[in-house]
Image (spheres, rainbow, N blue to C red):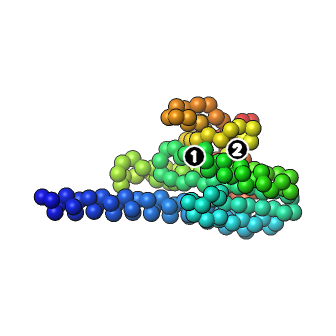
């Protein structure tokens, strides 16, 4: 009996490790895709800045000719919502605010909803792949932001939903999966 419990706990531990590894891999792939998109364009340079344990944004993009800098926090997943914690928005703001030589400084939240939706443990159903790029309103204090599969956003404060409509941002690259929620938001 005790032996079976030990094996079961070890199996659960391995499953959690595999799940975490898969989640990190999705995040890395999404960041890598965006970096490649920027680097294919003239005048743009983009860089992945490192692991999540470092106080850096996921991606730094610059266009020196047009005096533009973006810090990007990227989220990717199979659920119906994706969340960006306030501290990740804060570190993006700190970076963009430090580069005052750039005329245009934006914090972009990039959301990718994968073409499979998780409906249970190891169970998925097909859906449309969608990308949303939201620009942070620098007049707002950083708070947790949630993006839904339909592209609408809301704040999350101590588990309570609040109103927070972030504007879509048309990226300088083209993606057939980018969705714009509303032209006038």
The residue to which callout 1 is attached is 85
How much space separates mark 1 and mark 2, taking CA atoms?
13 Å
Q: Earlier in the sequence, mark 1 or mark 2?
A: 1
- In the picture, the disc for residue 136 is 2
Q: Secondary structure at mark 2?
A: loop
- In the picture, the disc for residue 133 is none
Callout 2 crowding tier (Cα within 10 Å): few <14, some 14–19, many ≥20 = many
Q: Secondary structure at mark 1?
A: loop
x, y (%) of residue 140? 71, 37
Examine the image and state in which quarter residue 173 appears. bottom right
Q: Residue at x 43, y 59 (%)?
A: 20
Callout 1 crowding tier (Cα within 10 Å): few <14, some 14–19, many ≥20 = some
Examine the image and state in which quarter residue 59 appears. bottom right
Horizontal side of 22 relative to 27 (left or right) equals: left
Which quadrant does the N terminus fall into?
A: bottom left
Q: Count the marks: how many?
A: 2
Badge nearest the viewer, 1 or 2: 1
As rendered, which of 62 and 119 lies closer to the eye? 62
Which quadrant does the C terminus fall into?
A: top right
Q: Is residue 185 visible?
A: yes
x, y (%) of residue 79? 47, 47
x, y (%) of residue 139? 75, 38
Vertical placement of 170 versus 60: above or below?
A: above
């Amino acid at each position: 009996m005790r032996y079976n419990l030990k094996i079961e706990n070890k199996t659960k531990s391995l499953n959690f490790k595999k799940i975490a590894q898969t989640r990190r891999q999705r995040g890395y792939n999404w960041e890598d895709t965006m970096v490649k998109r920027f680097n294919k364009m003239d005048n743009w340079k983009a860089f992945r800045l490192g692991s999540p344990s470092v106080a850096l944004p996921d991606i730094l993009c610059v266009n020196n000719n047009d005096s533009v800098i973006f810090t990007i926090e990227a989220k990717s997943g199979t659920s119906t919502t994706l969340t960006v914690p306030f501290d990740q928005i804060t570190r993006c703001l700190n970076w963009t605010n430090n580069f005052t030589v750039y005329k245009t400084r934006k914090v972009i939240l990039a959301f990718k909803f994968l073409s499979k939706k998780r409906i249970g443990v190891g169970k998925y159903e097909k859906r449309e792949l969608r990308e949303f790029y939201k620009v942070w309103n620098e007049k707002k204090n950083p708070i947790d932001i949630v993006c839904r599969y339909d592209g609408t956003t809301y704040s999350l404060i101590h588990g309570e939903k609040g109103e927070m409509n972030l504007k879509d941002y048309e990226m300088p690259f083209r993606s057939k999966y980018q969705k714009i929620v509303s032209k006038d938001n």
